[in-house]
Image (cartoon, rainbow, N blue to C red):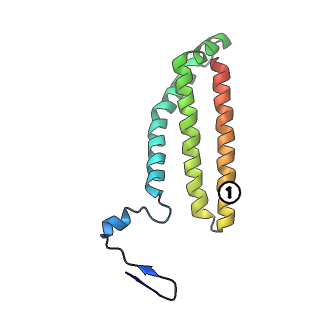
Amino acid sequence: MASPSPKGPHVSIMRSELGQVRGLGPARSGVAHWWAQRLTALALLPLTLWFILAIISLSGAPHEVVLDWTGRPLTVVLLICLVLATFYHMQLGLQVVIEDYIHVERTKLLAIVAMKAATFLLGLSALVAVLKLGI
């Protein structure tokens, strides 16, 4: 089963090539990351169109009308969904860019941690703003 080699023991596992591919590679999360990015992009399409159309319809409206619009429960829920999807999608995309273009592991790890912290804080700020407008 295991035969020693200069690089260490080699374990021979009887799996088909498809079974080996389904292991998702060394990171074990490539497919999940890809799907999350696609699903957030799909969610952002209607949410962004709704938001753009709403802003266009509110342009030139009095301040009270805009406050009334932001105070509606459906508007608050859709704005929260827009903020969450936007910042999560942004974090996923930036992580791919960092992983592709930064090759020093320590620098890559620090960049990803800093990016995720910044994304979290910016997203949290946007959520607080939405909730403050909606309440």
Quadrant where the C terminus sits is: top right
Is 60 placed above or below 91 here?
Answer: above
At a point 65% along the width and 32% down the height, the residue shown is: 126
- The residue furthest left is 16
| Res 39 quadrant in image | top left
**Label 1: element kind:** helix
Is 92 placed above or below 66 here?
Answer: below
On screen, residue 128 versus residue 40, left or right, reads right
Is 20 placed above or below 134 here?
Answer: below
**Residue 26, x across and y down, in percent:** 49, 66
Of 29 and 57, nearer the camera is 29
**Residue 48, x across and y down, in percent:** 51, 32
Q: From the image, tell me which residue sits under label 1.
A: 111
Of 107 and 27, nearer the camera is 27
At a point 57% along the width and 23% down the height, the residue shown is: 55
| Res 112 quadrant in image | bottom right
Is 84 placed above or below 1 here?
Answer: above
**Residue 31, x across and y down, in percent:** 43, 55
Of 12 and 65, nearer the camera is 12
| Res 80 quadrant in image | top right
At a point 56% along the width and 38% down the height, the residue shown is: 86
Tell me if mark 1 has few (under 14), some (14-19) or many (20+) residues whose alpha carbon lies within 10 angstroms of its own: some
Amino acid type for the residue under numbered disc 1: Ala
**Residue 85, x across and y down, in percent:** 53, 37
Judge whether residue 56 can be spotted in this image.
no
Judge whether residue 129 can be spotted in this image.
yes
